[in-house]
Image (cartoon, rainbow, N blue to C red):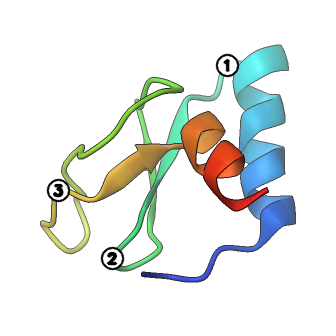
Amino acid sequence: MFQFDLDTVESACRESMFGLGSSGFCLSCGEEREGCEPDAEHYECYACGEFEVMGAEMLYVMIA
């Protein structure tokens, strides 16, 4: 599993709540993906092709 920086994930969560962002992160390669629901799990990563993208809020709860 890719190691995520808590500040990066928190920033994506804030953008989702107060802006127009809707990011998720790939657990395999760490790539950020737009167009993810906050509770997304197992979305496809456009960078590596794995179905390991998790919504930013869900990931934040998991690592915080």
The residue carrying mark 1 is 20
N-term mark: 2 or 3: 2
Q: Is residue 51 above or below residue 39?
A: below
Mark 3 vs 1: CB contact within 8 A: no
Residue 57: mark? none
Q: Secondary structure at mark 2?
A: loop
Q: Quadrant of the C terminus?
A: bottom right
Q: Alpha carbon of mark 1 to alpha carbon of mark 2: how far?
A: 25 Å
Q: Alpha carbon of mark 2 to alpha carbon of mark 3: how far?
A: 9 Å
Amino acid identity at mark 2: Ser
Residue 19 in sight from this viewpoint:
no
Would you identify the image quadrant in which residue 48 lies?
bottom left
Residue furthest left as drawn: 49
Please provide percent x and percent y for residue 15.
77, 31
Please provide percent x and percent y for residue 50.
15, 66
The residue carrying mark 3 is 51
Q: Residue at x 42, y 47 (%)?
A: 54
The residue carrying mark 2 is 28
Q: Residue at x 84, y 17 (%)?
A: 18
Q: Is residue 6 above or below residue 64?
A: below
Amino acid identity at mark 1: Leu
